[in-house]
Every structure is written in C-alpha cells, then in structure tokens.
Amino acid sequence: MSHTRVTCEERRLICACKQAGKNSASPHGCLFSLVVACPDTLYFALMFTEANNLRGGADRMKAPLTVALAGNPNTGKTTLFNHLTGARERTGNWTGVTVDCAQADFAAGGRCFRVIDLPGIYSFTADTQDERVARDYLIKTPPDVVVNILDASNLERSLYLTSQLLDMRVPMVVALNQTDIAEGHGLSVDHQHLSQHLGCPVVPAVASRRIGLEELKAAVARVAETRALPAARVAFGDAEHAVQRLQMCLIVAADDAAVDSRWLAIKLLERDPFARDLTGNLFEEIVSDETARLARHSSHTPAEAIMDARLGFIRGLARDVVKRNLDIKRRLSDIADRLLLSRPLGIPFFLLVMYGVFWLTVNLTQPMVDFIDTSLNLLLVEAPRQWLLAARMPEILVKALADGVGSGLTTVATFMPPIFMIFLCLSLLEESGYMARAAFIMDRFLCHIGLPGKAFIPLLVGFGCTVPALMATRTLEQRRDRIMTMLIAPFMSCGARLPIYAVFAMAFFPSRGGAMIFSLYLTGAALAILSGLLLHRTLFRGEVSSFVMELPPYHLPVLRGCLEHVWFNLKSFLFRAGKLILLIAVAVSMVSGLFEKFASSPETAAQTRAATGRVMTRAFRPMGMSEDNWPAAVGLLSGLMAKEAIVGTLDALYAQQAAPAEDPVAIGSELRQALITLASDYGFGEERGGAAESARSGLLASIRQRFSDRAAAYAYLLFVLIYSPCFAALIVLGREAGWRWMFFAVVYQTVLAWNAATVYYQAAKFTEAPARAVFWLTAVSAFTAAGIWLLRLFGARRLRTEHA
Amino acid sequence: MNPQKKPSALTDAQFLAELKDGARGVIASNPDRKSAEMGLFPGAVVTMFRNRKNERSLVIGAGDARFLISRTIARQILVSPSNFRVQQ
C-alpha cells in the first residue's frame, strides 16, 4: 500500500472521519472506521480505494519490482544473489544499523527487478540485529515477492523461517538450493509435493553452478505480477482459537500498521515487543485473557503452543517431502574438526592462523600505510599549500584546504590498507568455515571475562590499528559482546604508538629498549583482561550469553565473494566514519587557523600554547611531569588527533619550532624517496640507512633533559599507552557502538591512564618521598574504588532496565 | 541456570550435555527457543561430537548440520536413545 502522498479525496475523508469522532493515523484505518460509522460514505470510500489502487498500479508499472531474498545463513543466499543480478551491487543505506543489506537489479520478461539480499537468519523473532533488520525490512517496505531460500540438505531447519513467512502473508517463491549436496548426503526432496503443500512455486536450484536460475526468475516474475499469496498457513492447534479471536479484534490496527492481522495476532500472543509497539499496547487485556484461557486448558503459554504447532507443521511437511536413502555419515569436515578442535593440534594451528592474520594486517600493510601517508601528505597537504600560498589565497583558506581537507583525506586513506586486509582475512576465515572453529578454541579462555571466542580477532587486530579492530567487532552477534570488545580493544597497543616507545627507549633505555617496549605491550594486554573482568562484573553484569552457533562445513572460499565483502566494509568505513574524520579535520584546522589569525603575532600564539601546556602539566604532576616539560602535555593533546603525531609535536616544541617549516618542500624528490622506501620495505632495492636516527639525536637529548628520570618517562609512556584512542578510532566507536559509549571510553581510558601512570611513578619514587607517595597511592585507591562503585551502580541500573 | 527436571515419562531420556562423544539421540524436548529455531527441535536426531567437562561449549550434529552449543543450553535439552546406526 502506498502512503506516500495524501490526495484531496483522502484529506476530505480524514476530515470527515475526524468529525465522526474516529481519529485514525492513516487513510486506510480511517476509511474502515468511517465505513463502519456512516455507511453513506461507502461509495466515496470505494472511489478512494479504487483511485488508490490505480495510483499504486501506475506507480508499480514505473518502479522496479522488489524481490527480497530471505533464508538461513550458509544456504547459498549470497551466491544466488550474485548470480541472479550479475552482482551489479548497490549499497543500501540502512540508517542506524551496521548490518548491511546488498541490493542490485536484474531484468526478466521486460520488467526490472530489484533484489534485496537480507541478512542470513534462522527466524524473524528479532533476537539479533540481523533478524531485526530482516523483519523491519519486510514489515516496513513490503517487497513484491520474497524468495525464500531453503537448504535442501537441511530442509527441516530451513522450513522454520518458511513457516514464519507464511504467517506474514507475503507473495513468496521458494528456491530449493543445494540439491546437489542433499543428493550427496543421500537425501531427495520432492519439490512438486512441497509446492503443493506450501501453495507457492518451489524451484530446485544449485546456485553455485547456476542451475535453476532461469526457472527461478520466471517464477519470481509470475508471482511479482500477480502478487499471489501462498495458499498454505500454519494451524496453531491449542492456540488457534486465541489467534482467531485476537485477529478479529485487530483488523483495523493491522490495516493501520499495514501488516497481516493473523501475523499480528500471533506476534502479540508470543509477546513480541515490536508487535506490542505497533498496536500501542491496546490489546494487552485480550492477550492476557487468551493466555489465561490457554493455561487452563493445556498448561501451555501461547508462545509454547504456537512453537509446538509450528514444529509439528514443519515435521509433517519434511516427513512428506524428504526421502533419506542413506544413513547419516561422518563427513570430511567432521574428521577435520576432530583434529582442529583438539588441544594438541587445534591450539598450535589456531596460533599459526592468527599469526598469519596479524602478519597480513600489520606487517604487510605497514610500508603501504607509510607510503600513502608520505605521498598523500605531499600531494594533498604540502603541494596545495605551496600553490595556494603562491596564488596569495587567504591564510584561513590555505589552512582549511591543506591542513583540513588534505590531511583529513590522508588520514582516511592511511586506514584503507589495514581495513582492506583485516576484512579480507575475516571473510576468508568466515567463508572457509574456520572462524567458528577459532571461536570455539578461544572460547575457553575468553569466557572468563565474559566474551565469546570470536572476540579474540578484533583484540588481535588492535595490535595493528584500533580502527579496523573496532570494525572487526561486527562479526560478534550480541550487542553486549560488541560493546565490551570495543571498549577493551584500544588497550592493545596499536602500531602508531610504537614510534613514541622507540624514541623514549632510545633516550632512556638504550640497552633494554626491547624489553621496555615489550613490557608496555604486556601491560596493555593485561589491562584489557582486567578491564574485561571489571566490566563483566560491573557494567555488563548478568549471565554470559548462552549461544548456539552453526559450524558450517569447511570449504574453499570464493575470492570474488570475499572481495565483495571487503569492498562493502571499506565503503561503509569511507561513508560512515571517513566523512566525519574529514569534517573534524577541517574543523580543527579552521579553529587553529583562527587562533593563529587572532593572536597578535606568532610569538603570542606560541606563548598562549606554552601557557596552556603549563596549565595542563598541573594535572600530570603526580605522574612526574614537571611544569617546564609542557610540550609533553601538548603532545598528548595532538595524540588525540593521531598517536603518531606525539613524536612530531615533541620534536617541534622541544626545538622551539612551533610554526611549520617555511622551506618549500621539493615534492618530486620527496615522492621519489617515498617510493624507494616502499620498495625497500617490501624487499626490493637497498635497505634504508640510519639517517632518521641521527636526525633524532636532538630530540633524544631534549627528552632526556625535560623528563626528570626513567620513572617519569615510563609513566608518560604508560599514559600514552592507555589514554583515550585517537579521534578516528573514537568516531568509528561512536558510529558502531553509539556516542554514549564513545564518551564512556574516553573518560574510562583517560582516568585509568592517569591512575596507572600515577601509581607507577609514585611507587617508583616511594623511597625518595614516602609521604607524597602514600598520599597519591591512597588518593588513587579511593578514586578507583569510587569508580568501581559507580560502574556497579550503572551496571545494576542497566540490568534493571533490561529486565523491565 | 539449573537444569530442568526430567519428566518421569522419559525414564531413558538424558540431557544433551550428558551424551558421551559419538553417542546419538533424538531430541525429546527443548525449552530453549533459539536453539529450537535453528534446528534442534523435538524429533531431530543429534550426535555428540565433542563433550569435555572443562569446555563451555559442545560440538554436536543435528541431521546434516553441526553446531556449537553452550553447556547451559545443552543442560536443558532432553534426548531419548536413538535407533539409528552410526557409520564410522
């Protein structure tokens, strides 16, 4: 039904209805009420309906017909989608959700069809985000036809979704996929018999070999034209009477919500919150009556009776149409599982795979990231700056374009190689079937901090870069698990922090630099575990989600499908987070430009910066930062933009070079140098010399001079390790988990960083100043206790809200 | 979560979590909706592939599908002995 435009007739009708005291939200609900109230309006109402139908018909002739693909995971849904459409994919923009649905067009019988690939789901109960997306799509934008993909080798399980689609009363075609695998397992499915039972076309297909696709297209075209509904419906045994009675009561409400009244009745009896929202809780009394009546007769709740009847329907159907010619056999996958899930072989194999993922995502992409950073910095920041300055453009414009747009684009581009690689690895792992096994292996370790085994992968990727790590949490089904993983992933020390550690190691720990850096990495991992434990016991209290997860059979991944998945996520990063990163970069550069413009001279600007830094050092004094070491405090601020910027800021401020270098950069030669570096990093050409180290000797001396001793330097590094993630990571966190969680992450990590650095510094200085150390250690303990108490409080409130 | 009490009529039945490796049974009842929706419904033939006391999850087969299922759910699912032959 089209509700897009309210015509004059409709408006008059609504006015008439309101006068009759029958307020209704939509023309259709209003129409029903009006016809009941004043039969005289029937003629007018019929005219309206006819006009509406004509309008809808005309619209339909122009617009492509929509086809939604719905089915269980691992039924070959995406393969079917790609082969039906030739994978000319267009990204659907699904506001507010991170589960993406692909859509693309195909033509058949002179009509255009738009295919929507809904996420793979087992039911429409909306326990997971995938199920919610699929259900909301079918309810809010009913497609012209739904293609329900059944796995012929697992027919009984696939039919559960079919039975729910029958309730929804949508035009439906069944694609009986993977018939070849079913035959291999000794199963034969009588598709004609199944079609008779369901009352809709059933097309046998092998999507991977393009068998049955033409027949499927023809069936889709036929059903989409006629909008024929399936003839079958599930009878709900003990609950049938309750369903029918409720259905009668909510015909108008169902019409208002543009859903089938029987489906709405079933959902209300199942106490589905979405259905209750749709009806504004108006039918609670009838639902309670029917529940009580059913309890008296059969000691079942309506939901149980509905489930029993549904399962009975499925079993009967499967018994009729499936013939098993062979007994169930152990498959090759089972034998592989016996080896790969066992401890002696499984854990080493898992570690090997994870090392591979880490190597590909971090080591392989790092030179590429450096190259993109250097070259784009030259092409998009330095070159435009020179051109704009030469063209005598206003300084603020130069700032906005070069430092804002240019460096924003550079930042976004540097994240592309690791994000590409991590999603390639993730989809290879998913497609091959190993991901579920890896989750099993890690489950026994991560369950102690209340996380599922799959959470290990984002945590591992966190050692490379926090941004792809946060994106990789998309593989976790439960929102609680995703948020918890996103909150602890930033503790894994990312690659951008390494240069800072390296500089400080050279300055303070020349002989034991490696051990010092390793200790920081270990501290990060330990803090991730401790934070996991703390959050699991406070903010995310409650039972660890019990789960059922399918172990798909092992198979060789199809590279094309994997690359499509990667492209999808890259685009998602570009459009969701990239835009914001760019915007913030422009805003920050404008603010800094304005600050410099309104300062009376460059000296005043530098003085203001130093004064701000000195004020900041007061907060960092307990962790050993003296007032004259203000550049270190300013460095922390620039680290919020990007962690690697800390070294640059320290270098510039210690050398009193606050203003950018005035010498024009020779772009051509710098680019050539970047290319040579890239080639040498990948093993082509000669190794680089130690020029960078010698250039940094001045910086090392300044660091040694400004930081009083090793304890202060290590405390500073601890703070750098733990404090708030960079703004790109924060934007991704906000986009994926919500802005509230982003603020929580900033506060939690920064407070924890301050506590850890202070505890370390004061403990190290205990013998020198015991009274001061005792004071600060007590203060930190009290502070921590208060923090834990607050977290427990919020956790209890969350639990109460969830129960409510 | 406490395991549900076995009904007296199902004297031979045991909980899925009690099946030994390689043992097979038919699901007699499953109060957990999610796992039932995924195919572990009454009448489905299940095979235990991996059941270790110290592991939180079990590996089972139901028909031709394989599942990881947490022990808390497996303690709610009742299975009765199956007459199917197992081909090794």
Image: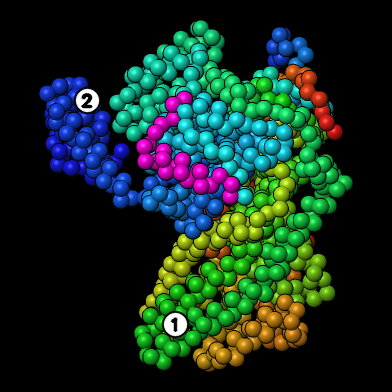
Where is residue A68 shown, x and y percent of the image? 46, 43
Kindly tell me whether residue B2 is visible in this rendering: no
Name which quarter of the figure residue A750 lies in: bottom right
Viewer-side residue, A353 vs A152 = A152
Determine whether A515 is above or below A162 in the image. Answer: below
Q: Is residue A219 magenta?
A: yes
Q: Chain of mark 1?
A: A
Determine whether A457 is above or below A239 in the image. Answer: below
Q: Quadrant of the N terminus of chain A?
A: top left
Kindly tell me whether residue A374 is visible in this rendering: yes
User: Given the image, on which type of amino acid does mark 1 rest?
Assistant: Thr
Q: Which residues are magenta?
A: A210-232
Residue bearing mark 1: A604
Badge 2 density bin: few <14, some 14–19, many ≥20, Cα 10 Å: some
Residue bearing mark 2: A33
Name which quarter of the figure residue A417 lies in: bottom right
Residue drawn at point x = 58 percent, y = 76 percent: A373
Query: Most prominent secondary structure in the magenta stretch?
Result: helix
Q: Nearer the viewer, mark 1 or mark 2?
A: 2
Determine whether A516 is above or below A392 in the image. Answer: above
Residue drawn at point x = 46 percent, y = 40 percent: A219
Residue A423 got which mark? none
